[in-house]
């Protein structure tokens, strides 16, 4: 393969004389200036001299190329006698050059292009559900190794000194039919050892085999390279050999029972990581808002729950590494943005009238809101009218996985129950299921989910008692709205009545609501 760089670009409109890279074996190229890929679809937009200087390779249907013979030699580092034993051929064209590989399965022949990684079979439509490789019986060994591909089976057999039975799956996409067909044969071996890459496809295949043989299923960890043939071609067969003769017991990816699992968990997981809120009482008791679980903020109606949530949202954005996602179901997006602008400016601009009365133009409000949201670090999303409440789980996963949100604020959670249209019993059932699954999701993604909830006059959580049970931290807020003392009337008190991570309970201070600026702050 020869790569010619710093060539003139063949695309019209691109004036670069040295940004094009041309591969004269594959007859393909790429311009690093205009990002054009050569050859383009239907050969459009090219300069007159393009095909003369960069000839286009005639597209050949590799499946129909005639062959003149085959060889067992020169096949990806595998010895010819091993290739012959396994029925792996390198088939040659009429000019004697390699065209394709052939793998003789029990009931069919599988082909792979020599240069292009395309697969097809001799008898199209006939299912491939047999193990590939020579006939080994239980008398030859107590162990059988299973690989994902044909090259890997022959490679591992060679690496293991031609002593252990090694077969491969027809592909990683095996199903129950494959297991049923091969169950009796595999059962004759004491140990079944999977030696394939544990990517998504490989993991699914391993899980299926594990389900069939849970007591005697093992696997070979792939360290430097992803499969046995790569080890062989890299000259690292000895490394794989020692791993193969001492396989590890396979466990599903939701079971952990090894020294490696202990090491990975302690090194990679950070239980109850947190971001301080800047509020001395909350931070002293809980260190901040915690990830890996649910935080439950609860209060009767009229206590200012949404504004408390806003105080915490702005605190999370003070950390330059955090992103937040917000679902405020009782307010418009403009209400949220104006409130954030109010915190940014220190002046009430929550409505157009408030902004005008305080001498702040709409352009200044917009700029302040944009500054407060920290560009893409604030993600606002909504529940659609037709959404099932459980759809929230999908939105939370998307906000965390796609948009990178570390904290998600859901205000207030009872609105989800109202979306269910299933009555009181249905609402309670919905929120119970939602709470359990959301708690698991928060742990899985290591995010903090903050539910803001309304409680009844008797202090019980309306429809959502199960959410409170699932939470790792519960914060109760209270305000004496009927007090004749203006300061007390506008002071929100915090009580921590559940604190699984840090165990500190009780009074956690307060926030004062400034009626002029409409901003919450600690202390009067």
Image (tube, rainbow, N blue to C red):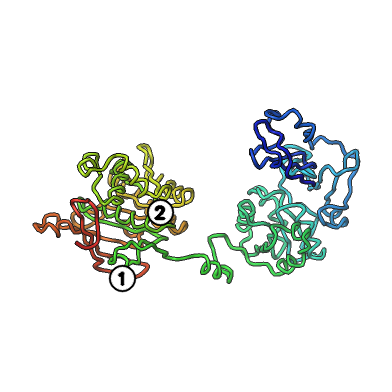
- Give the label on residue 438, or none: 2
Q: Quickly name the residue at label 1.
A: 504
Give me the residue at 43% from left, 47% from top: 376
Q: Nearer the viewer, residue 189 or 16?
A: 16
Residue 460 horizontal/vertical position (percent) = 23, 56
Q: Quadrant of residue 226?
A: bottom right
Give me the residue at 76% from left, 30% from top: 49
Give me the residue at 21% from left, 44% from top: 358
- Give the label on residue 380, or none: none
Residue 449 horizontal/vertical position (percent) = 38, 55
Q: What is the secondary structure assignment of the residue under circle 2?
A: helix
Residue 75 horizontal/vertical position (percent) = 83, 52
Residue 427 horizontal/vertical position (percent) = 31, 47
**Relative to residue 289, is residue 258 drawn left or right?**
right
Residue 224 in view: yes
Quadrant where the image shows the C terminus: bottom left
Q: What is the secondary structure assignment of the residue under circle 1?
A: loop
Give me the residue at 38% from left, 40% from top: 387
Q: Nearer the viewer, residue 1 or 165?
A: 1
């Amino acid at each position: 393969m020869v790569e010619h760089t710093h060539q003139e670009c063949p695309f019209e409109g691109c004036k670069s004389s040295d940004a094009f890279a041309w591969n004269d074996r594959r007859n393909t190229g790429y311009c690093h200036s205009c990002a054009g890929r050569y050859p383009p679809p239907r050969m459009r937009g090219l300069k007159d001299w393009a095909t003369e200087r960069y000839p286009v390779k005639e597209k050949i249907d590799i499946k129909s190329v005639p062959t003149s013979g085959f060889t067992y030699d020169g096949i990806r580092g595998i010895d010819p006698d091993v290739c012959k034993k396994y029925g792996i051929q390198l088939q040659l064209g009429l000019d004697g050059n390699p065209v394709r590989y052939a793998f003789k399965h029990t009931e069919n022949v599988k082909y792979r292009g020599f240069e292009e990684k395309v697969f097809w079979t001799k008898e199209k439509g006939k299912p491939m559900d047999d193990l590939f490789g020579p006939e080994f019986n239980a008398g030859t060994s107590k162990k059988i190794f299973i690989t994902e591909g044909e090259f890997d089976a022959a490679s591992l057999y060679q690496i293991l000194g031609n002593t252990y039975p090694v077969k491969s799956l027809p592909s990683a996409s095996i199903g129950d039919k494959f297991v049923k067909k091969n169950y009796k044969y595999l059962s004759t071996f004491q140990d079944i050892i999977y030696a394939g890459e544990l990517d998504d496809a490989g993991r699914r295949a391993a899980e299926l085999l594990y389900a069939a043989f849970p007591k005697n299923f093992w696997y070979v960890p792939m360290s430097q390279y992803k499969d046995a043939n790569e080890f062989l071609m890299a000259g690292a067969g000895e490394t794989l050999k020692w791993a193969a003769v001492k396989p590890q017991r396979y466990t599903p990816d939701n079971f952990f029972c090894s020294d490696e699992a202990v090491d990975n968990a302690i090194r990679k997981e950070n239980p109850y990581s947190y971001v301080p809120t800047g509020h001395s009482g909350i931070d002293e008791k809980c260190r901040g808002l915690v990830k890996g679980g649910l935080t439950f903020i609860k209060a009767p109606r009229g206590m200012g729950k949404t504004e408390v949530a806003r105080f915490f949202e702005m605190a999370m954005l003070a950390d330059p590494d955090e992103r937040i996602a917000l679902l405020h179901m009782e307010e418009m997006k403009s209400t949220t943005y104006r409130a954030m602008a109010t915190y940014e400016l220190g002046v009430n601009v929550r409505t157009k009238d408030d902004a005008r009365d305080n001498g702040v133009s709409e352009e200044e409000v917009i700029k302040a809101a944009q500054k407060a949201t920290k560009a893409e670090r604030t993600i606002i999303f909504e529940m659609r009218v037709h959404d099932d409440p459980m759809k929230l789980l999908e939105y939370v996963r998307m906000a965390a996985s796609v948009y990178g949100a570390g904290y998600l604020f859901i205000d207030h959670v009872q609105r989800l129950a109202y979306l269910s249209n299933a009555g009181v019993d249905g609402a309670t059932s919905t929120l119970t299921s939602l709470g359990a699954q959301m708690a698991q999701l928060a742990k899985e993604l290591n995010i903090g989910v903050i539910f803001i909830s309304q409680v009844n006059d008797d202090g019980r959580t309306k429809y959502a008692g199960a959410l409170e049970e699932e939470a790792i931290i519960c914060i109760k807020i209270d305000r004496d709205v009927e007090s004749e003392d203006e300061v007390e009337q506008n002071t929100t008190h915090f009580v921590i009545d559940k604190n699984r991570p840090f165990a500190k309970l009780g009074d956690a201070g307060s926030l004062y609501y400034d009626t002029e600026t409409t901003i919450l702050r600690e202390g009067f």
